[in-house]
Image (spheres, rainbow, N blue to C red):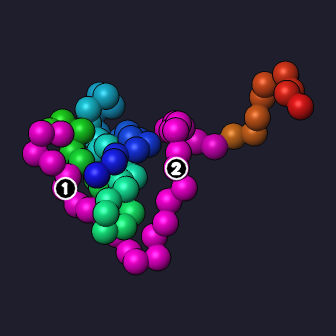
Amino acid sequence: HTLSSPQFIPRANGDGSSTDGYIMCTVFTQHGDQIWIFDAKDLAQGPLCQLGHPELNFGFTLHTAWLPKITSRTASYNCS
């Protein structure tokens, strides 16, 4: 298995701590791509659930980011 793109998801109505929520990962397995969800406070227990579908097919990703909300781009620089 190859876990990729770990993403922290805060728990609704949580205490706001960095472990009060879930870790979601995309996972490449020999049986197909999956989404695994972990309890951020207890990663050692393994995934809470493993989600897959025969038509699920991830591209390979290297970076992730959690944003509390999506807004317009505000940077003033531009790279061609």
Q: Position of residue 20 (x, y in %)?
A: 26, 36
Left or right: residue 62 compared with residue 4: right
| Residue type pointed to by label 1 | Leu
What residue occupies the far bottom of the structure in this picture? 54
Measuring from the top left, give residue 34's x and y in whole percent. Answer: 35, 62
Q: Secondary structure at mark 2?
A: loop
- Is residue 45 inside the magenta stretch? yes
The residue indicated by pointer 1 is 48
Q: Which residues are magenta?
A: 43-70
Horizontal relation, residue 60 to residue 16: left or right: right
* Quarter placement of the C terminus: top right
Q: Earlier in the sequence, mark 1 or mark 2?
A: 1
Q: Secondary structure at mark 1?
A: loop
Residue 59 falls in image quadrant? bottom right
**Magenta region includes residue 47:** yes
- Position of residue 80 relative to residue 32, above or below, is above
